[in-house]
Amino acid sequence: MPSGKILVADDDAAIRTVLNQALSRAGYEVRSTSNAATLWRWISEEEGDLVITDVVMPDENAFELLPRIKRLRPDLPIIVMSAQNTFMTAIRASERGAYEYLPKPFDLNELISIVGRALAEPRQRRAPSRDDGEGEGEKIPLIGRSPAMQEIYRIVARLLQTDLTVMISGESGTGKELVARALHDYGKRRKGPFVAINMAAIPRDLIESELFGHEKGSFTGAQNRGVGRFEQAEGGTLFLDEIGDMPMDAQTRLLRVLQQGEYTTVGGRTPIRTDVRIIAATNRDLRQLINQGLFREDLYYRLNVVPLRLPPLRERVADIPDLVRHFFALAAREGLPRKDVEPEALEVLKRHRWPGNVRELENLVRRLAALYPQDMITANLIEHELDQGEPVPRLAAEEPEQGLGPFLERYLGGYFAGFGEALPPAGLYHHFLREVEPPLIAAALTATDGNQIRAAELLGLNRNTLRKKIRELNIRVIRGSR
């Protein structure tokens, strides 16, 4: 049976009762209080092997109490509970030395498991990284109270005092760079630089030079020594966005950095030691790229030390009201009129599929703030804005004569019947992709009147990825044609 004395502090009598019963059944001795003063007295008298405390109590905020507890008893594990459930709650709990943060309502079995783990682990002195209120009032980088976002907050909080490599995956517009910046801005490297590079936005033959720098005369046009992103990020964080678009040669160089902690510039011979935390991001399936021979498997495992998947907005629609209010507040701070949203309008927003995710929602909110004089945004106005985009034709199964499936069946049947053309050497997948991609992108640009931002949202692509494809496929962008 487990053993240990648990101190519980919460001003909600029902929660104290539930915790008392659950922890007692699990074999622990429990002592509970409704205020911070009593909790502090017990801790000062050397009582308790673990503390479970709410953040907001009648006499003192737990975040003000935690630094004093850690100075007096640095080895005492503290579990923080909160109904506020924001990103900054999780961050502040971590910064002030909490063992774990649990949003309310919480799962009792999970809490019992955390208590057992905390008491079983070797006690190590862990001083809070900040206890002077630094960071209060900073711009909140992540918004949402949904269970999916709560798990993101908890993982980010656990990673702040580490240099572990993180792989962030998620659709375009889900906020991958925001998470990377949060890991840097609130982590142990926050005093160093944060440097971001998007692999899809740089010509493939220049990526190695951009990353590692180059020596004078190392290639045509290299008239001076070039400083790479690794050198710029020294002592800080390097964010490698769209890592799936990195060419193979650059992947090999990056693997050496991760394995040996050093690199050479393009045209250089002397290895350069580096101290940089790597955070990578992708909206592509790297496993599929590995199977296609486009991404190194050993590099994948080096980067995927801590995988972090960001949910698309359609999986966290409960966060839409908070996000809308946040974006309207940002717009107001930028000088746009302040707006309110009626509940029915929020319900309309929750029913939308959001192919462009949070970025699409932010663009909509800014457009509403800028273009409409009404103080109250109504459901009809939202529906009007969402209907502005032309409907996208769908290949419906109930219309087989117009569907792609029957065409492919006939197309492939020709090969195996012996009267079709020779199979393309690169395989049918790549063959059809090359055939379909240019007209698809051109059609999206036509539908959006040449607006590349809206076309990227329509296609579900990153804007830089779309620009790169327009350039590579030599697609002509015509504006003002509608």
Image (cartoon, rainbow, N blue to C red):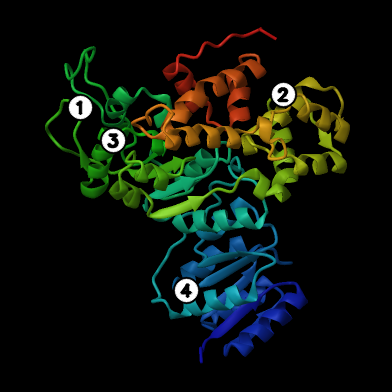
Residue 165 placement (x, y as % from top left):
37, 50
Q: Toward the viewer: 376 or 35?
A: 376
Asked if the residues shown at circle 1 and circle 2 are in contact, with their CB atoms under 8 angstroms apart, the answer is no
Q: Residue furthest front?
A: 418
What residue type is disc 2 on? Gly
Give residue 213's position: percent from left, percent from top. Answer: 25, 27
User: In x, y percent, where is residue 351?
Assistant: 77, 43
Q: Mark 1 Cα within 10 Å, few/some/many (few <14, many 20+)?
A: many
Tell me which amino acid carries mark 3.
Answer: Met
> How would you rate the neighbour count of disc 2 (Cα within 10 Å): few for under 14, some for 14-19, many for 20 or more?
few
As helix, strand or loop, the secondary structure at mark 1 comes to: loop
Residue of label 2 = 335
Answer left or right for 366 relative to 470: right
Q: Residue at x 25, y 34 (%)?
A: 249
Q: Earlier in the sequence, mark 3 or mark 1?
A: 3
Residue depth check, mark 3 versus mark 1: number of the one nearer the observer: 3
Q: Which mark is residue 73?
A: 4
Visible in this render: residue 198?
no
Say what amino acid the circle numbered 1 marks: Val
472 sits to left or right of 347: left
> Which quadrant of the rendered structure holds the C terminus?
top right
